[in-house]
Each structure stands twice: as C-alpha cells, then as structure tokens.
Image: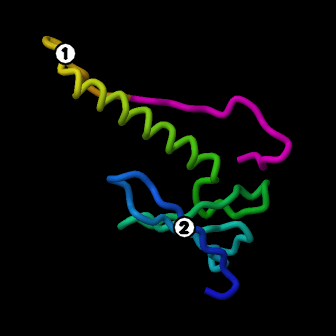
Amino acid sequence: RTGNTVCRRRYATGSPRVVTGAEDRQRGSTFAVQIASGAHAFHTDLQPQAGGVDAGPSPKELVLAALIGCTALTIRTFYENAKWAGSSLEGVEVEAEELGAHPHVPSG
C-alpha cells in the first residue's frame, strides 16, 4: 500500500509462512503497526512517554513474550519427549523482565 511499510519474513516449518507488518495511522499513533500472522492479527505500539498511544504491546514486550512462549513450549516438548516414568509436569510458568535500559531503545 502507498505510504505504508510492509515487511515479510519466512519462518520454520509449523509456523505461518508469512508474517506481515504495516503502519496503522488510524490508531492515532505515529508508531502503531498492525501485524498479521496466519489467522492472527494484532498491533504493536509505543507507550505515550515514548511517543505512541499504547495501541498494543511495545516491540520489546513482544520480544519478551516470544521468548517466554518459546521457553515454555521447549520445556513442555522436552518433558513430553522424555516420557520420564513416574513423573508429571503439571504446568509451565515463565516470567521475564527487562533488566536495564539502552539509550537507543525507547522505554516502555
């Protein structure tokens, strides 16, 4: 589309073949991006103190969410593949937090 930036990237087998992102100025933010991944669509944006309107999680939050999801799925996959006799894994809970700021990355 004219005036919008579109990025495409291919992922591993089992993931959507194409993930797209396009600026979404209708959200009232200079930085809002609509992302489509398979059957899913969501927005990312910056918090107001970084120039956005908080129309969605920040890119940093999405990276942390991806790491959390990958870690939890990996733990579950290892457990299921090991089939340890007499053991059970009731659930997996993972938490991540930002440990510091970088001068070139907006907070939030």
- How dense is the environment of label 1, judged by Cα within 10 Å: few (below 14), some, or many (20 and up)? few
Looking at the image, tell me whether mark 2 or mark 1 is earlier in sequence order: 2
Q: Residue furthest top?
A: 86
| Residue at x-position 30% and y-position 30% | 76
Dot in front, 2 or 1 = 2
Q: Name the spot of residue 101 as percent of width and height, x first.
A: 78, 36
Quadrant of residue 91 within the rendered picture: top left
Q: Name the spot of residue 29 as percent of width and height, x first.
A: 71, 70
Left or right of 59, for residue 38: left
Quadrant of residue 24 within the rendered picture: bottom right
Q: Residue furthest left?
A: 86
Check the picture and name the quadrant holding the N terminus.
bottom right
> Residue 23, labelled with which disc?
none
> Residue 8, labelled with which disc?
2
Q: Name the spot of residue 17 as percent of width and height, x first.
A: 40, 63
| Residue at x-position 35% and y-position 67% | 39
Image color mode: rainbow
Q: Name the spot of residue 15 as percent of width and height, x first.
A: 37, 55
Secondary structure beneath label 1: loop
Which of these two is toward me, 65 or 8? Answer: 8
Secondary structure beneath label 2: strand
Left or right of 3, for residue 104: right
Find the distance from the CA under tag 2 to the CA under tag 1: 40 Å
Q: Amino acid at mark 1?
A: Trp
- How dense is the environment of label 2, judged by Cα within 10 Å: few (below 14), some, or many (20 and up)? few
Q: Which residues are magenta?
A: 93-108
Relative vertical location of residue 81 with respect to residue 105 in this rendering, above or below:
above
> Residue 84, labelled with which disc?
1
- Magenta span dominant secondary structure: loop
The answer to if 19 sits in the magenta stretch is no
| Residue at x-position 70% and y-position 84% | 3
